[in-house]
Image: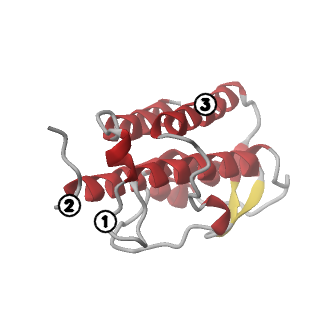
Amino acid sequence: MERLGHTRDELLLSIRDVSEEQSRFKMSPDRWSIRDCVEHVVLAEQFMYLLITRDHTLSGPPGSLEREKAILGSRGGNRNRKLMAPESSWPTGRFDSLEYTVDAFVSARGETIRYVSGCEDDLRARSTIHPLLGAINCQECLALLIVHPLRHVEQIREIKDSPHYPRRL
């Protein structure tokens, strides 16, 4: 529960003073903007939530506490290793502004927190199929959901560090 709140807060802190104009800046036409990053996090959160709560089976791979700990300690993975997000989580401008995108993230993370706080099931006893990792247990999927925003916090820092990023006056 604490980690769910912490990674939510890290993402929110990374965009706290970002204007709408800044949120749309792209380092190049084929790269994501800050708003795109947040939209992707929303879509990935909603998708993994469904994997955990609905799209699973009760008999699955036993999983590994070591792998779960590695996921939680990963800060979302190495940004030097580029990953192709599943097409269903590509940003397309579904939200009208950065504000609405952030509201959607806060809502999705709130739903996850409510579910986890009331969950009495053993998520390690459920398995699901993650589009990048394949068969995993739902506790590992939750670990991915927890740290995923951190990968994009790093991406947002990269965008802000770009020499052409629009600065506020």
Whole-percent x, y for residue 133 in the image: 62, 69
Whole-percent x, y for residue 44 in the image: 60, 53
Q: Could you tell which of marks 1 and 3 lies nearer the N-terminus?
A: 1
Residue type, numbered disc 1:
Met
In the figure, residue 76 lies in which quadrant? bottom left
Label 3, label 2: how far apart the Cα atoms are: 32 Å
What residue is shown with label 1?
Answer: 27
- Asked whether, in this view, residue 107 is left or right of residue 146, the answer is right
Residue furthest right in the image: 58
**How many dots with numbers?**
3
Residue type, numbered disc 2:
His
Label 1, label 3: how far apart the Cα atoms are: 28 Å
Query: Which quarter shows the C terminus?
Result: top left
Query: Quick one: 20 or 54, which is closer to the camera?
Result: 20
Whole-percent x, y for residue 11 in the image: 40, 41
Q: Could you tell which of marks 1 and 2 lies nearer the N-terminus?
A: 1
Query: Quick one: 55 or 70, which is closer to the camera?
Result: 55
Does the rendering let one see residue 75?
no
Label 1, label 2: how far apart the Cα atoms are: 7 Å
What residue is shown with label 2?
Answer: 164
Mark 1 surroundings within 10 Å by alpha-carbon count, few (fewer than 14), some (14 through 19), many (20 or more):
some
What residue is shown with label 3?
Answer: 107
Does the rendering let one see residue 77?
yes
Residue type, numbered disc 3:
Ser
